Image (spheres, helix red, strand yellow):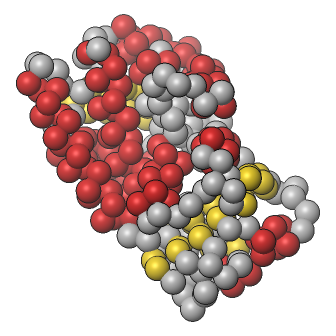
């Protein structure tokens, strides 16, 4: 079994991005990423800091805008409208999860689709589902997963892919991307019956449940590929994925946690930011 090295692939992608940023600099353009963070969710604080740092390292102008936990939906939307109108901003991201009084769909729909670096706007989700020919941004976690599958030459055409989870962040766009890549896709959720039977027949299993060690890798088919999207912190501080028992399986590939999908998500976020800047130049 090969453990997929997300850190290594992400490093390679970041080197590519640095080149593209240089090309834009020659045109006098600096890609701009605005991150809005509402409230002070501890995990989000770390992610947002990380995004800011990686962007800065790559020559992307990143701005983190912090808003208090009791901010109204209208105040966030007004902030987004200012960023929509700002030509220095190519990409806008509002960090999830937001406080419970905020309707995240309303926030995502307020972002200009041409600055929608998460690909969560209904227009861009429609582009994904229709497999549009023109450029559109897509969610960065599933985008990173598709990159890993390609990098390790995991075939999708004609393969049975099981996506466990149906969030807008991961599950839904993941299922659409795998469908567009000619896989036969099953999307499972918390109400799915006989999940173990599906796990036993799938060629590719993507687990995005957000629940520590919820799935047992030993139940998967020999030669299958496992993508573990979960990042869960246990009481003792250790980070674990959604899938247990990855070692000593007869899988073809599996992603570790940490060091699998996580580093890819941030690299693809930067890649999408640069693509949006390129679109705004064109
Ligand atoms: N929270 C965790 N991952 C993400 C992401 O990719 N985008 C946004 N907006 N929030 C997140």
Q: Residue at (60%, 46%) from the top-left corner?
A: 181
Q: Which of 9 and 80 is in front in this view?
A: 9
As drawn, the residue found furthest toward the top would be 85
Side of 257 relative to 190 (left or right): left
Residue 50 can be seen in this image? yes
Quarter of the picture holding the C terminus: top left
Q: Residue at (66%, 31%) from the top-left corner?
A: 129
Side of 21 relative to 200 (left or right): left
Q: Eyeballing the image, is 79 above or below 260?
A: above
* Position of residue 209 measured from the top left corner of the image (x, y, whole percent): 67, 59
As drawn, the residue found furthest toward the bottom would be 248
* Position of residue 110 measured from the top left corner of the image (x, y, whole percent): 54, 16
Q: Nearer the viewer, residue 282 or 80?
A: 282
Q: Residue at (20%, 36%) from the top-left corner?
A: 20
Side of 5 relative to 123 (left or right): left
Side of 116 relative to 34 (left or right): right
Q: Eyeballing the image, is 78 above or below 148?
A: above
* Position of residue 225 measured from the top left corner of the image (x, y, whole percent): 59, 70
* Position of residue 162 measured from the top left corner of the image (x, y, whole percent): 72, 59
Q: Residue at (29%, 32%) from the top-left corner?
A: 274
As drawn, the residue found furthest toward the left would be 26
């Amino acid at each position: 079994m090969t453990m997929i090295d997300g850190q290594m692939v992400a490093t390679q992608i970041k080197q590519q991005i640095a080149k593209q940023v240089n090309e834009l600099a020659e045109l006098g353009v600096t890609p701009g990423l605005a991150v809005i963070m509402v409230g002070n969710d501890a995990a989000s604080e770390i992610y947002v800091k990380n995004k800011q740092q990686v962007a800065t390292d790559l020559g992307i102008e990143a701005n983190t805008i912090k808003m208090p936990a009791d901010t109204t939906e209208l105040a966030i939307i007004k902030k987004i409208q200012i960023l929509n109108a700002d030509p220095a901003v190519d990409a806008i991201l509002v960090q999830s999860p937001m406080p419970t009084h905020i309707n995240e769909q309303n926030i995502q729909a307020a972002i200009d689709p041409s600055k929608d670096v998460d690909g969560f706007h209904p227009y861009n989700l429609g582009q994904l589902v229709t497999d549009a020919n023109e450029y559109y941004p897509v969610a960065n976690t599933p985008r990173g997963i598709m990159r890993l599958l390609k990098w390790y030459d995991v075939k999708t055409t004609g393969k049975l892919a099981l996506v466990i989870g149906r969030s807008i962040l991961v599950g839904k766009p993941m299922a659409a991307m795998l469908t567009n890549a000619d896989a036969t896709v099953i999307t499972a959720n918390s109400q799915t019956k006989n999940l173990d039977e599906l796990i036993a027949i799938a060629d590719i299993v993507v687990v995005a449940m957000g629940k520590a060690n919820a799935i047992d890798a030993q139940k998967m088919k020999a030669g299958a590929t496992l993508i573990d999207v979960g990042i869960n912190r246990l009481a003792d501080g250790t980070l674990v994925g959604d899938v247990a028992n990855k070692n000593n399986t007869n899988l073809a590939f599996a992603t570790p946690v940490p060091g699998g999908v996580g580093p890819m998500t941030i690299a693809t976020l930067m890649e999408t930011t640069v693509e949006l800047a390129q679109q705004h130049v064109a």
